Image (spheres, rainbow, N blue to C red):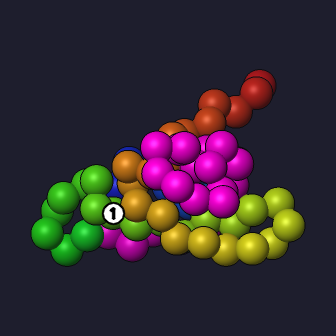
Amino acid sequence: MPRLKIGDRVRILANQPTPFANLEATVRGVQINDRAVTPLDRYVVTFAWGEEQTFYDVQLEQVERVR
């Protein structure tokens, strides 16, 4: 079962070199790993300017929504 779901807000972790480090995005798709290894689940995210990118579970942290 994936850790994140469509609509969740996430932050791209800076533990690997990426131009998207520390930016926030919204999960738009989930690609579950067929071997049931959760860290290898992939997520399609959309940034505020409309660009979509794909990241592994371990590259993302969930951002708490302000209520």
- 42 or 6: nearer the eye? 42
Residue lying furthest top: 67
The residue lying at 77 percent from left, 25 percent from top is 67
In percent of width and height, residue 29 lies at 53, 71
- 23 or 16: nearer the eye? 16
Q: How many marks?
A: 1
Whether residue 23 is in magenta: the answer is yes
Q: Quadrant of residue 22?
A: top right
In percent of width and height, residue 28 lies at 61, 68
Magenta extent: 11-32
Residue lying furthest left: 35
Report the residue marked by disc 1.
41
The residue lying at 40 percent from left, 61 percent from top is 56
For residue 1, side relative to residue 13 (left or right) = left
The residue lying at 14 percent from left, 69 percent from top is 35
In percent of width and height, residue 21 lies at 62, 49
Whether residue 24 is in magenta: the answer is yes
| SS for callout 1 | loop
Residue 54 showing in the rendered view = yes
Residue 13's place in the image compared with 65, above or below, is below
Q: Quadrant of residue 46?
A: bottom right
Residue 4's place in the image compared with 48, above or below, is above
For residue 55, side relative to residue 7 (left or right) = left
For residue 35, side relative to residue 67 (left or right) = left
Residue 33's place in the image compared with 1, above or below, is below
- Which amino acid type is marked by label 1? Asp
The residue lying at 25 percent from left, 70 percent from top is 33
Tell me the quadrant of the picture where the N terminus can be found.
Answer: bottom left
- 13 or 41: nearer the eye? 13
In percent of width and height, residue 34 lies at 19, 74
